[in-house]
Amino acid sequence: MNISVIVPAYNAEDTILDTLESLIAQTYPNWEAIVVDDGSTDETAKLVGRFVERDTRIRLIRQPNGGESAARNAGIAHAVHDWLLFLDSDDWISPQHLRRLTDELLSNHTLDAVHCGSARVALDGTLTIEEYLPPSGDMFPTLARRAAFPIHACIVRKSLVEAVGIFDPSFQKSSDWDLWQRIARTGAQFGAVREILAFYRTRPNSVSLDAHLMLEDGLRVLRQGHAPDPRVKNPHANHAKGQPPEQIRTQEFYLLSWCAGLLLGCGKAAQSLLEQIEDDNYPELYADAVAQCIFEAGVLPTGRALHEWEELWPHVEPHLDKFLAALEAQSMSPDLARRARNSLLTLIENHSIVRRPITQKHELTLQKQQDFIAELRRDKRALDIERKKAQKLAEDRNRDLQKKQAAIEEIERAKVASEKDLEKLQQIADEQQKSLQAQQAFIHELERDKLALEKERDDQHHLAEERQTTITALQGKLWVRLGLRLRILRRPDAINYEGKKE
């Protein structure tokens, strides 16, 4: 099976090299990459151009800036294969990514998509592995509530993406969640590969971290997952009306807590987010889940790893209590602020490299943390070695491809020369054919003249015979008359012309 990889890129000169290198390093060769330069003003197009020259499977399309969804849709329009992978220009994939996911698809032809595990990479290279493992099969109940995986962790049927209306450009955030939700609403079957094969980096001040806009678009996707969606023309009967509306409230508050973590991580107040759900409350709100959302999101704006929360805490604390108090009042959840704060502190302690236990129950030893970090570093080194091997293999294959391409070009040149020679020969043959036709016409004309002459000769011969017959007849008559005349002259009583006897 063949895969079209769509890579939207806008001012991505700092990251696009790693993204495309991860594609070239794939152990699965049957792919094409369409890089859509969405109006970049830096060196993005120039850098991609080098990869286009290096690997014929990579193409570059340029267009005026229209946003991420417009760029992805442009890539879909140019894709020639039946399966799609969307790979952002600041992310990358493991060398085994395409092979493992395609193996899963080939082993089960009922699947419409397959996703894998993913990890976030902090500025210091620390991997944060997503502990939540998305289910397989019918994923609409999951995708109605949350974005289950990053966009480049999933391969999907192109026909299905087109059937549900491709990416909705009215979303500035969460457009991928919106697409997966629409696909799942059709009853599409998802497969799952549990290996960590997709990686995405966090960068300070990333445009993806606009908390207010993220909450606005996220709430829109969440609410449409709990109602009918007229954009999906063929929903599965079980999902036509969406998930039960009464389930929205809990997910609204958790989504809000995640977005609040983005603001708090920047050292900003987050109470203003509550204005977007001011009419809702949820007394059963789970304090540990609120803390987990803030904990995971808080490090994203600065690109930190989770173990660096202690450095982040002085910037977060001044605004944290005010937000939790406002959240407690809004949700009407008793003692939420205190419980969520304590849970957050426990999470910070458990992930701290410097051992500062708060309670014996949640104590993590320094040795365990160091072992865990060492294991991650070993995994990273192993991935780097595998990547280099795959890259060398790709370079060797690319050289072979270049040689083959040169041979093909030589054959093409010879073919063109042969075609020119053939064309000349054809022209000569045409001229000879015309000459032959002229000669044949001349021969036909001579044959007609010959027939005419033969007919004229026959006519003259016949006429001569008739004349000869006439002459013979006249001669006979003349001799008869002459003989008669002689007999008369011999008679004694011959009378002359004057009537006298002679």
Image (cartoon, grey):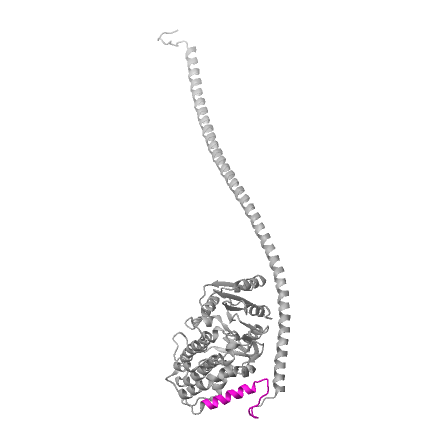
- In the image as oriented, which residue stretches furthest toward the left? 499
The residue lying toward the viewer, choosing from 46 and 325, is: 325
In the depicted structure, whether residue 460 falls above or below residue 245: above
Percent across and percent down for residue 278 are 38, 83
Residue at image point 52% right, 80% down: 299
Along the line of sight, which residue is nearer the eye, 139 or 292?
Answer: 292
Taking depth in this image into account, of 448 and 379 the one nearest to the observer is 379
Quadrant containing the C terminus is top left
Q: Judge whether 34 appears above or below 236 on screen.
A: above
Q: Quadrant of residue 251?
A: bottom left
- Number of labels in the image equals 0
Q: Quadrant of residue 93?
A: bottom right
Residue 431 painted magenta: no
Q: Residue at x 57, y 51 (%)?
A: 416
424 horizontally vs 287: left or right: right
Residue at 62% across, 69% down = 391
- Residue 493 to residue 475: above or below: above
Residue at 43 percent of width and 15 percent of height: 482
Position of residue 184 measured from the top left corner of the image (x, y, whole percent): 46, 78
- Identify the image quadrant of residue 306: bottom right
Asked whether the viewer can see residue 135, the reply is no
**Res 349 visible:** yes
Q: Is residue 492 above or below residue 318?
A: above
| Residue situated in front as seen by the camera: 79 or 286 | 286
The picture places residue 479, in percent across and down from the top left corner, at 44, 18
Q: Position of residue 322 (x, y in %)?
A: 44, 85
The outermost residue toward the bottom is: 360
The residue segment tinted magenta is 337-362
- Figure quadrant of the N terminus: bottom right
